[in-house]
Amino acid sequence: MDIFVSPVAGNIAGNDEIGSIECGLGNVNTPLLVVLGHSQCGAVTAAAKAAQGEKGHDLEKHIGLPLSHIAPAAKRTVEAFPYLRGGEVIPLAIVENIWQTIEELLTKSVAVRDLVKKGTVKIVGGVYDVGSGDVTWLDTAKVNEILKKADAAAGKAPELSQETAH
């Protein structure tokens, strides 16, 4: 059990994926959490095309849930780079989606956030180039910024009463 892999289209962090990641970190004691996007990602491409007003492929009708998770990252990318069209925006949307996934993991999972804060787990983001096999690692300083933001958001979240929690 040297590695725990939880692949999902668009490297999203929905409840099922977060549960699987918590299992890997907590039960297998995985010390490194890699959120790895890849070039030519079909899910991010579909979300970016939709954010640009393009109709998706008929085969994409069953990936609605992953696309709904990716759509905010794609939309932010399209809005941040309005001069880019079509495939030009895809690589940037892939990176933005990785950051979004890291933020969701740290915001939604107290367990993941606590492990990262303790230094038991390190989170890194990267983009795998399917053509060359190379991985471009993203700036780890941004992970620390996201952690601070997630920590601040957690501090503002209302506490659940015992009655509400049941």
Image (cartoon, rainbow, N blue to C red):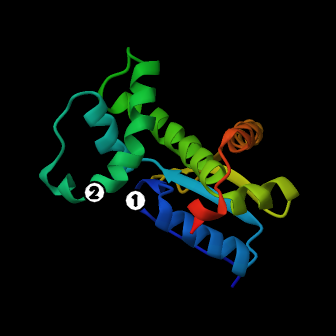
Q: Position of residue 60 (x, y in %)?
A: 21, 53
Mark 1 vs 2: CB contact within 8 A = yes
Please name the residue shown 44% across and 63% down the image: 8
Q: Which residue is mark 1?
A: 9
Residue 40 visible in the picture: no
Q: Is residue 4 above or below residue 13?
A: below
Q: Position of residue 159 (x, y in %)?
A: 68, 50
- Which amino acid does the dot numbered 1 rest on? Ala
The answer to whether residue 18 is left or right of residue 26 is left
Quadrant assignment for the C terminus: bottom right
Please name the residue shown 74% across and 43% down the image: 151
SS under mark 1:
helix
Please name the residue shown 86% across and 58% down the image: 119
Q: Position of residue 3 (x, y in %)?
A: 66, 76
The answer to whether residue 112 is left or right of residue 71 is right
Q: Earlier in the sequence, mark 1 or mark 2?
A: 1
Q: Residues within 10 Å of mark 2 (few under 14, many from 20)?
A: few
Residue 65 visible in the picture: yes
**Residue at the farthest bottom position:** 1
Closer-to-camera residue (164/44): 164
Closer-to-camera residue (93/166): 166
The answer to whether residue 37 is left or right of residue 125 is left
Q: Report how many numbered discs are placed on residues in the image.
A: 2
Quadrant assignment for the N terminus: bottom right
Q: Position of residue 2 (x, y in %)?
A: 71, 80
**Residue at the farthest front position:** 163
Q: Is residue 72 above or below residue 105?
A: above
Q: Which residue is mark 2?
A: 63
Q: CA distance from mark 1 to mark 2?
A: 8 Å
SS under mark 2:
loop
